[in-house]
Amino acid sequence: MTVVKAGVGTARRGLAATVKRLLVPLAVVLFAWGHLTQTAFHWDCPIRSVLHVACPTCGMTSAARAMLHLNFAKATHEHPLALVVVPFVVVLVGIELAGYVVTGDFGVWTNKSAVRIAGLAMCATLFLVWIARFWGAFGGPQHV
């Protein structure tokens, strides 16, 4: 019978894998924070830039910024679904990143049917509100 001992090399490889898994969430958080605070990253919506029309999520970044300042009235003015979409995305991304740190794989929660149904319902609602805003509903049309 052969006894296999976990040596220092095995522990180092495990630690290196954990550190690598922690770098992905750190990069995502830094990127998101840099974009939301406009301290590091800023880009224009490609749909707005190319087609000169508002996209279904136009105003969502400004709404998220307003929510960071606890200005929920401004957030709903920027996008009427901000108080639903932003927390949903933040929680989903947070859970996925935590799952990645633990397992090393993405899709821990997005493979669940309830989460997929909620995501599809959110996309459908964003699309319907987008169409309604073109007709003047919810403070629309969004200025581009």
Image (tube, rainbow, N blue to C red):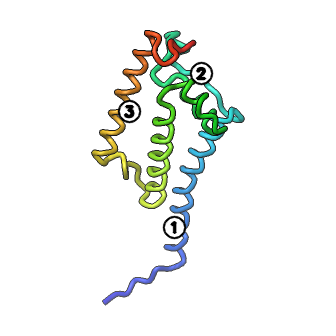
x and y percentages locating residue 10 in the rendered image: 49, 73
* Closer mark to the observer between disc 1 and disc 3: 3
> Callout 3: helix, strand or loop?
helix
- Residue bearing mark 2: 44
Work out whether residue 108 or residue 72 is closer to the camera in this orientation and state it: 72
Amino acid at pointer 1: Arg
Q: Which quadrant would residue 102 be assigned to in this image?
A: bottom left
* Closer mark to the observer between disc 2 and disc 1: 2
Q: Is residue 27 shown left or right of residue 123?
A: right
Q: Are marks 3 and 2 in contact (CB under 8 Å)?
A: no
Alpha carbon of mark 2 to alpha carbon of mark 1: how far? 41 Å
Work out whether residue 55 or residue 50 is closer to the camera in this orientation and state it: 55
Check the image and report above or below for 141 versus 124: above
- Of label 3 and label 2, which has the lower sequence position? 2
Alpha carbon of mark 3 to alpha carbon of mark 2: how far? 23 Å
x and y percentages locating residue 54 in the rendered image: 50, 15
- Residue bearing mark 3: 122
Q: Residue furthest front?
A: 73
Q: Residue furthest left?
A: 113
Q: Is residue 40 shown left or right of residue 73?
A: right
Residue at the image point whose x is 41% and y is 49% from the top: 106
Q: Residue furthest right?
A: 39
Any mark on residue 13, and which? 1
Alpha carbon of mark 1 to alpha carbon of mark 3: how far? 41 Å
Check the image and report above or below for 34 versus 143: below
* Closer mark to the observer between disc 3 and disc 2: 3
Amino acid at pointer 3: Met
